Image (tube, grey):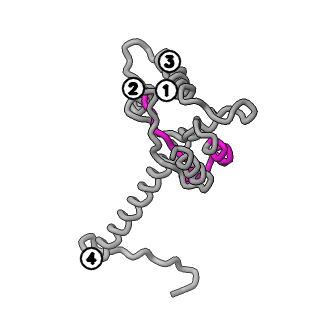
Amino acid sequence: MAAGKPKKEKIFHPQSRKAAQVERAQLRKSKIVEAQAKKVKRAFSAIDKYLFFFHAIPPESEKEALTLEELHELVRDVWLCRHDVALEEERKARRIGRPKSTKEMNLEFMKEREAEEYRTGLELPDITHPTNVALFRKWDQSALEYIDLLRFIRINSQDPTAVVVSRSGKHESLKLAAANEMAIDS
């Protein structure tokens, strides 16, 4: 073979075993790429949620943590209403008799889904626990792995006084705080 000639691509018979093997490998690669894209999309939606509550933490100079009542007000009055302006703009931009835009339908779906999640139980970082808030403040706002160290609670709109610790947190300071609380309770 001469140095200047490009290498020919092998062509297989469509019903050959080699063609089926190449096709399976290609399908496997496309499924992996698709799964990675879905994983990244889920991670971004989770990070958006955590970022919202990260920015909702009061400054250290004001207070250590929110009360449960303040947390419910935050979710009800800010979290659930954050898309209202964009939704209203989409409704105003639509002419009479025209179908809803994709963006408007997505915003409505997201708002309904979040309201239902809050009604049945919304899981979020515990910003009512001072130790957890101190850890949450140290988050660099991009590493999703750090979030696993935090304590999470589940709150719902049906019973605003109920709090369920859904994840106790993996950080050592949270484990020490939990042990101290257990010692005080006993």
Dots 2, 4 in contact, CB < 8 A: no
User: In front of the other: label 4 or label 1?
Assistant: 1
Residue beneath disc 1: 80
Q: CA distance from mark 1 to mark 3?
A: 14 Å
**Type of amino acid under label 4:** Arg
Residue bearing the label numbered 3: 88
Q: Magenta stretch containing residue 143, yes or no? A: yes
Residue 29 x/y as whole percent? 41, 64
**CA separation in Å, label 4 and label 1:** 55 Å
- The residue positioned farthest toward the left in the image shown: 15
Q: CA distance from mark 1 to mark 2?
A: 15 Å
Q: Residue at x 39, y 76 (%)?
A: 10
Q: Of the residues tagged 1 and 3, which is closer to the observer?
A: 1
Choose mark 2 or mark 4, whichever is in front.
2
Taking depth in this image into account, of 150 and 1 the one nearest to the observer is 150
Q: Which residue shows up at 53% across the image and 48% down it?
A: 182
- Residue type (three-letter) at the residue carrying disc 1: Leu
Question: Local crowd at mark 2 within 10 Å, few (<14), some, or many (≥20)?
Answer: few
Mark 4 vs mark 3: in front: 3
Depth check: 185 or 2 in front? 185
Query: Which residue position holds label 2?
Result: 158
Residue 158 percent coordinates (x, y): 39, 26
Does label 1 or label 2 sit earlier along the sequence?
1
Stretch in magenta: 133-158
